[in-house]
Image: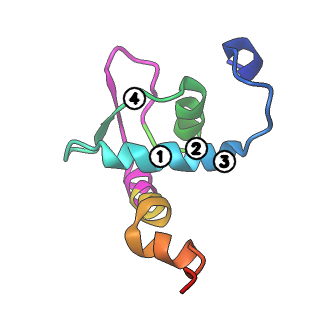
Amino acid sequence: MPDRERNLPNIDYDREKVEETVLALLWLTLDGHRRAWKSHDWGVLDRLHERGYISDPKSKAKSVLLTDEGERRARELFEHHFGIESLRERRPPSDP
């Protein structure tokens, strides 16, 4: 569903970055069997499915299954966006 039909603010945003962040958050909620809760934006979940990272979110299940590639990429993105070392590398040095 297009953003304008979902009453989102009329702003430009980096859809790929949103997809990466959602995939990283799916990794955070994995249950140990590559299943993650699908309580994220449906359009983003559809695009992640089209890229081959997750099972089809259009089902009665309340979770999606990450593919092998999806799980690998999700962990990589989670470490990149939320890992402590990664955050330190991106922060400017603090003033003395």
Q: Nearer the viewer, residue 81 or 35?
A: 81
Q: Is residue 22 above or below residue 83?
A: above
The reply to whether discs 2 and 3 touch (Cβ–Cβ < 8 Å) is yes
The secondary element bearing badge 4 is classed as loop
Q: Amino acid at mark 3?
A: Glu
N-term-proximal mark, 3 vs 4: 3
Q: Amino acid at mark 2?
A: Glu
Residue hosting label 3 = 16
Instruction: Work out which quarter of the rendered image holds the C terminus and state it.
Output: bottom right
Q: Amino acid at mark 1?
A: Leu
| Residue 29 sits in quarter | top left
The reply to whether discs 1 and 2 touch (Cβ–Cβ < 8 Å) is yes
Q: Is residue 62 above or below residue 27?
A: above
N-term-proximal mark, 1 vs 4: 1
- The residue carrying pointer 3 sits among few (fewer than 14), some (14 to 19) or many (20 or more) residues within 10 Å by Cα, namely few
Residue hosting label 4 = 38
What segment is highlighted magenta in the picture?
55-74
Residue hosting label 2 = 19
Q: Is residue 31 magenta?
A: no
The secondary element bearing badge 3 is classed as helix
The reply to whether discs 3 and 4 touch (Cβ–Cβ < 8 Å) is no
Q: Is residue 96 above or below residue 28?
A: below
For the residues labelled 1 and 4, the Cα–Cα distance comes to: 10 Å
